[in-house]
Image (cartoon, grey):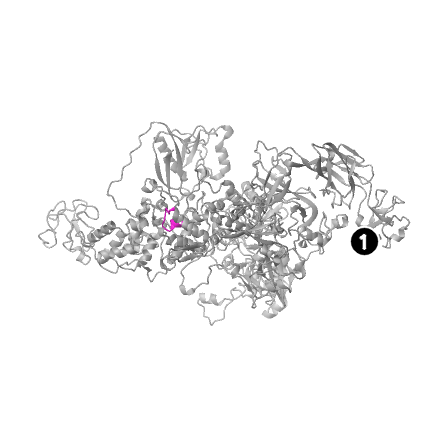
Amino acid sequence: NEDTCKLSIGDNPCMQSDAAVEVDVVLNEDNIRSLFPLHNGTRYVYAIKGLVLGDITTPFEESPCVTTDYTRWEKVGSACSVDTLLHPNTTATLTQMFLSTSDTSNPFLVDVKRPARDSCHSDDDQKLGISITVGGICYTQVHRNHLSVYDATEWAGQETEEMMMMMNTDPTKEPKDLHPGKDVNIQKWAECYHNPEAFDELHNSNRCTQDSRTDFDGWSLTFPSNSNFAPPHEMVRWYEKSALYWKPVKTDNDGSGKGSRFGDVVNYRDFIEDLKNNDVANAFGGIEFASAATVGVITCGSVGEVGNDPTFGALFDTDNNYEETSGSSDHNQQKTKVWTAINLFENDQLRQRMAWALSQILTVVPGNIDGHTETEIYVNYYDIFVRNAFGNYRDLLQEISYSPLQAEHLTYLASKSHAYIFQDEDKRVSSADENFAREISQLFTTGLIMLNQDGTPKLDADGNTIQVYDNEDIMSMARGWTGFQRFTARGNIESHDNSNRLDPMYIVQDWRDRFPKTSLTDGYIGDGFPLCVDLPERMFLREGAKYRLLGSNPLPELMKDNPDFANPKYNFTRFVLDSGPLHSALSQVEGEWKAVVILDSTLLCTGAECDVDTVRVVKVENGESHVYYEYVAPPCVQQAFYNGAKGVARYYRSEEGNMCANPKLPHASEACCDQYLYTTVKDATRNFLYDGERVTYSTAEDRCGSLCMYKDMDGVVPRNRRHTGYHWLNTPCDVQVKINRDGYVAIVHDLDTVKMEGAIPLHVSDESLNYFKVYWTDGYPSKTENNCGDCKVLSDRACLCQTSVADEAVFSLGDVFTAADIISSLRVGHVDPAIFDASTFIEEVETEFTAYVKTPGSYDADTVFRVNDEATGRTLFLRNVKSTVSLEGWSHAPAIFEAENAKNMTGVEVKSGCKRCTGTVYVEFGATADMYIEWEVSVPADVDVNLKFRYVNEYNNRPMEVLVNGVTANPLLDFPSTGALDYWTNSAPVATRLKAGNNLVRLQFASAWPTSNITLDSSIKNELAWSGTTQECQGDCDRDEDCAAGLYCYKRDFGLPHVPGCLGVPSSNTMDYCVSNEYRYTEGGPNVDHLLVEGIPTNHPSYSFPNPVHFMGLLQDYSSDGIGETNRRDAEYETAAILDHYFYHPNTAPFICHRLMQRAGFSNPSPRYVATCSEAFRTGLYTTSGGVSFGEAGQYGNLAAVAAAIHLDREATSPVLDMEPGFGALREPLLKPIGLLRALEYEHAPRENLAELWFTRNRFAQEPYEFPTVFSYFLPEYIPSSTPASLAAHVSPESMLLDMPTSIDMLNGLFSLVKYGLTDCTDGSGLSRYPGYGSCNDNGMYERASGVMEWLPLSTNVTDIIDQYATLLTAGRLSSESRQKIEEIVDAELYNTECSQASAHRQKDYRGFLNVTKKGYECQKWTEQTPNSHTRTPDKYPDAGLGDHNYCRNPDSRSGGTYCYVNSAETDRDYCDVPTCGDEHSARRLALQAMLTTPEFHSTAPIKPATNKARPVPEAAAPSGSDYKAIVYLFFGGGADTYNMMPPYPGACPADNDLYAKYKAIRGNVALSMEGPDGVNGTSDDLHQLPVTDNPSNCSAFDLHCSSSCCALSALLDALDRAQAPTTADSLVGTSMHRPLIDITVAMHGRSPTDAYLVRTSFSFFIS
């Protein structure tokens, strides 16, 4: 919603600013006191004391042994002076309660709950104020609000105008103090501490100054429950008034009502709004909001949110966690009201039909969401479909993917990566939630099988369908749905639990999986995106660069910086723009700061812009005011493996965070130091242009002159970690590959500079389990064949190999290739070459593509092709390169030769006990020329290799000589300082050639040191050295300060016969000399661990794979330091790429078209029809035969074009096609009443606000929003069995709902709408609220209706009536047969003798032939006097229609209507049920009812004339007489304690495996007891013993628990017994049965609190 964002100028316009969210406040005496002056004496904040236990009986103040709510305890760090006398059981329970609590952070108080499974002894149930010693700490129970901290300002004030109005107080009167004892008695506890004299003077009292008063400490208030300074207050006063007027200082996010306690730590952002202001934020180290002239806060709109309009009246209620004003059913049905009102009365019906169809494809199931009764969240989600119904399917996909409802429904909310869990939870192995990854593909985009564009399945060479994805794909894509989290709750939204299920989610970068993810097309998510290393320099100034307005907040939103960057007291250096082209582009336009700025051209750099590699947040100054903009780098990807990696480390190189980084990317900062000078290695410095700056390796070198393997960053001034981050090291780093037994790989960083445990983060260490799939070029060895070649074999049997990356051109200039070849062959994207400097690329236009080359007449790996992808309409830029990763462990293996395996050594000292060594010992060199160590290296043939020595050296440089076979390979190999004796690293490589066979590699003390033309001068006296002017090669010095500028003192501690950089031999072994910084050497040699030889060939085959890519950086953050490259921006880019991958998949167009066609009434669209829709989806345009176009050309996924293609195609409009057997569909049940009500102009009664269709799923098996599963109401591929559709393989999804009860309920509901209107009477439709109350009259008056259909046919002629109804309700498709039947029904109603005219007096006119009463009695003849005598004879009532018959009559005009005397001794007479004869109104209603029974109304399919032939009866299958196996499926409805459904039977298991004893020990007091009165095994009505055989437990019996839903199994077992089934342990999953199909339905009434409702459970045994 960034397009809606505005800069709000003002003094703290949004009280809760992100700029202060990380400030913690300890609620101690000083901080609570300070809140009074920080609010200029207007807020009264206190910790409450004096509350007592037991003064009033409430559930909260019960004994800790009784209440299940929390209790509060004061704690002191020593044993209690006297412990309360408690029963041992009670002591054990309370002890466990304290030992298991997680509430340990408060030094004074602890709130605990007694676990329900633990209980005290009953003797202690009513004890209050218990004291008990646990773990040396004394815990004493106190009141549950004791020392809670409140804002009592309101209680210290007066009645508000609103309060007076509510209490009908005379508004002319002065408002009263709320506190009965006057406001001063609440104010004094703060005032008397801060302003005692002024307060007493103001109130003409001595409240503060009397000597006896010492309790006004300014931070607490004592409730006078029992005091000598105020009348005692009953505790009921506290309960009543505190709930109304005392506000906990902390927002109640957990709903507990506990607030905050004295001693708690509260984040500033969680303070209630009344306590937040500039002074408070600044006092506690947060942001001080500037004045209105210099500050701005970004405020953004919520899509679809509008202001409340009170003129509409109170139409809706909200579901919240405060006060319920409506029942759950009312809340639940509000969203249905909204949907119904729109679909009945609004004019955008095609949009609404599209939205309804889309909602059934991209479903959300309320039953999966903890907010089932809320309204706003569901209508907001549905609005996504309304808003995008004619928009783009890609936008719709993005909105539903970021929907918190979808995330909760499909369980990827707060899904975390394996790397995060592995590091955060002590190496726990986990995997990402796969639910959404599966459904978004299967149901929302691609479907399960590959499709042609006409929707027909693609087949392989064997004629089989081809899967779109497999489980490997789902596991990979699932990692792309990690990190999603809801925003915190905000105002103006409905929420029953303070959760924000309304606003789109954000991505928590630390939770996100950062590693490559394979796509559904044998590539990677990120293929086709440019490599980050290929972006032009200073991308932030190039055309298309994007900036987002941050207002006054200097913290970025899409990246992460240290929160302290927002705190002005630290004086951070900002990147400031006060002039220049970029400043102009970001400046105000007509007095407004733009929310988003995108550069429309490349800008020239000015000032510091020319010296930085990139920017993060820029401060734009405009006179006295300023704002901040965040630079949003474009989407790009990094290759998982690359050559030339450099090491990076954090502030201390010894701490975790040593990793590899790509030196071409600005991912770390400079660490300025000289590797040859220990003082700079120990305390490296920085040379940065702004805090948080990242630079490339080369820029870091330029800034510093030299980099090193620093020890720490203590040279940074000021000495503060906030000014540091990741820093470049001048040492190489190996990006290795770890390969598991299945050929999956993980990235491992091997940084030579450190082998300290834990220094390399777990996610890139050799312990990493962050495996991902790669596409091996020629396969990978199977598990049995794989011995890792010469790679390292890890403890988990994985291989750890060195890698090398080779980039090569795919196409050459002379090759013949097409645009399609380019798209299918090239995976690496590129930005538009037009944004590079003009001389970078040369454009060469070809027929199907354009090439951008750097070398004219040549296509190389740097060439970029521009092609048009006809399938998706996109323009692609692809780089002509293939990047391949090879495993060096199979081709050229690095070999390690440990010190302990050296062939010869002289003079060196062998030492052990090295924790960081690769071997068991290392050697320490002294400083004599005869010291050396020598290894024997064998190679199969002459080969060029690199030699490296792993060493450690704390001080300066110690050069050594390397000899190979007696010949010097390097006379002076540097071994510079590593900073400390436990920082091991590798030396620079020595390139040499080894001969076939055995070779000797020797490392010895250097015999020749570098010299200059200056000769040693030993004549200088010591006293001259102190002058600081001792020159080069002069002595004797003692420290660097003794030497002239630029020189340092060379210490000759070993007395070697030379001085670096000087000619001649020292005259004294004790004299030290000043030498040039160029020769910073130290006498003696390094400590050496091993020799590493790289490049020895092996006899193993070579393995390789294409280089995977990923969006997220691997440099992670630590806590909130914000130093890493794992950020929200790249997570959002990756999510967009995943959605694009689904969206542009070739299956998506035909799959979505087919689904939408089915929802539009075409269950079986033809391939041509689907292809037409797919074309519209792909091109964005549909043009009718008349030349009218819909959509937008070139906009792939345009739903307006799709809707037009579906509804305007000839297959949808041609009446000729109506007779095709597969044409049309059954109408969805819910659309029938909606269509009826809308067509016949439903209007609700004046007393009603909206049409209320109450729980339509009860009548029509459908209800808006109420999807039963993710598959919607029915399956799109459903084929009803034993029907013509099944024989023709035609699907009929809606048929899934049309069982007999639903069909009858649906017709009854429709009839009720016609007869009674929308009503709640007994015979009502069940659509109005509370159906089943009162009776209705079918008289056309609709007395009880809340709404009726107002439209009437414009004729009284029956034929015309039927014609008009047919047009409205069947689109004129009513067949002649149906018309004739309706006419017959209406005629029978109008001319029926078996009725009474409505105007007749009490049905006296009836002359029909009914002779059975309402109660079912047969009538007695009027001429007979037995069994009942009477006086209503034909002779006495000659005109009443009496005679020698027994038909119902009313000769004497009885009020109950017609009656007769009966042939029964039980009663003498009974009334008859004679209907009222029809009139034109009833005829219309009857015609309408009859219309609603026609097949034309219930379907859009063609109706064939009836054949009037009986359906064939299928022949019964003859029993085979053979055994067969059945699979028993048990479907349970309702709740069940599944662990108690089938417990072990006591005594039925062997003693060494007593399952019942184990069961009882685990289940505790809820275990089923099976003991009889004598203490031995007994029986119970709730238990059903089940003997079993052949089971792994060797138990002879189990029990079925009939108190749970499982009691229905008793009936099942009885059925099994009757069927003579053998009872074995596998009876419930499959057994041999000698019986046919069995169906059992059992009605159960639960007998436990968890099962107290009626449950119907069906058991079906399906014979396989």
The magenta stretch spans residue 1160:
yes
Q: Quadrant of the C terminus?
A: top left
- Element at label 1: loop
User: Label 1 amino acid?
Assistant: Gly
- Tell whether 721 sits left or right of 257: right
Q: Is residue 1562 above or below residue 850?
A: above
Q: Which residue is mark 1?
A: 1046
- Tell whether 538 sits left or right of 432: right
Q: Position of residue 856 (x, y in %)?
A: 62, 51
Q: Is residue 182 above or below residue 1325?
A: below
Q: Please tell me which residue lies in front, 221 or 1185.
A: 1185
Number of numbered discs overlaid on the protein picture: 1
Q: Position of residue 174 (x, y in %)?
A: 49, 71
Quadrant for residue 761, please give it: top right
Report the residue at 33% width, 62% height from top: 1246
The segment highlighted magenta reads 1155-1166
